[in-house]
Image (spheres, rainbow, N blue to C red):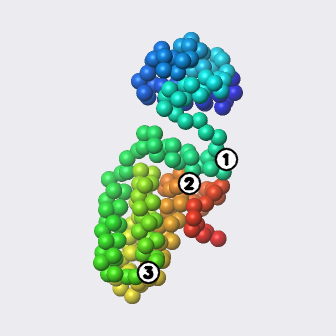
Amino acid sequence: MSYESEKLAATLKAAREKKGLSQRALSARAGVPQSHISKIESGAVNLTVSSLTAIANALGLELALVPRKAVPAVRTITRSVSDPPKATPEARKEFAQLAKQLEHIKSLKIDSPAFENLQRQFREMRQFGNLIRNTDTLRSIREALKVVDGAGGVAALQDASRQMNSFRNTLAHGMGDEDPARLPRPAYRLDGDNDE
C-alpha cells in the first residue's frame, strides 16, 4: 500500500473514531462490508473509488480534487474546521484591545479608505486567532494605531494596515508565529500581499 493510501486509510479511521462509529455501524451507513472496512483501515486492501466515496459520504466527508496551488489554503481551512485550537488568553486580550482601539479611531471620524481596509483586515485576521501564540505582532499593530490620534493620521493607518495585512497573510498560509524570513515563499497569495 502506498504512503498516500495509508494516509487516506488512517484519515478515514480517525474520522470514524471521532464520530464514535464502530466498523459495523459504518458498514451499515456506507453499504460497504465491515470486513472490507477492516481491511481498508489495516492496509490489507487497496481502496477503490467507489468504497472511498461511500465511506466518505457516510462519515460526512466530501471528496474533491484540489489544484496543488490551493492545497495550503485547503489544509489551513480544514485544520480550522476540525478540532480548532482555542486562541490563547493573551491573544484574546490583544484582539479585545485592538477592537477597542479601532472603535476609538472610528469615533475620530477619519474619512479614509485605509480605515475601512483596516477594519476588514482585522475581521479576517481575527478568524486566525487560534493560530497566534506570540502576541508581539498584535501589540505592534496596536502601538501603530495609537499614533493615529496624534500627528500620524492616515499615514499611521496605512502603516498599521500593511502590518495587519502581512500578519493575516502569514497566518492564512498556516505559518503561525514562525519567522517568515526563514520560511519559503508561499505558492499563492491573498489579495493585497505586496512584499516585493
Residue 173: image tag:
2
- Dot 2 surroundings within 10 Å: few (below 14), some, or many (20 or more)? many
Q: Amino acid at mark 2?
A: His
Mark-to-mark CA distance, 1 and 2:
16 Å
Residue 38 quadrant: top right
- Dot 1 surroundings within 10 Å: few (below 14), some, or many (20 or more)? few
The answer to whether the residue labelled 1 contacts the one labelled 2, judged by CB atoms less than 8 Å apart, is: no
Which one is closest to the eye, mark 3 or mark 2? 3
Q: Residue furthest right?
A: 2
Residue 184 quadrant: bottom right
Location of mark 1 (residue):
67
Mark-to-mark CA distance, 3 and 1:
37 Å
Specify the quadrant that holds the C terminus.
Answer: bottom right
First of labels 1, 2 by sequence position: 1
Badge count: 3
Location of mark 3 (residue):
112
Q: Nearer the viewer, residue 2 or 12?
A: 12
Mark-to-mark CA distance, 3 and 2:
28 Å
**Horizontal side, residue 172 vs residue 7: left or right:** left
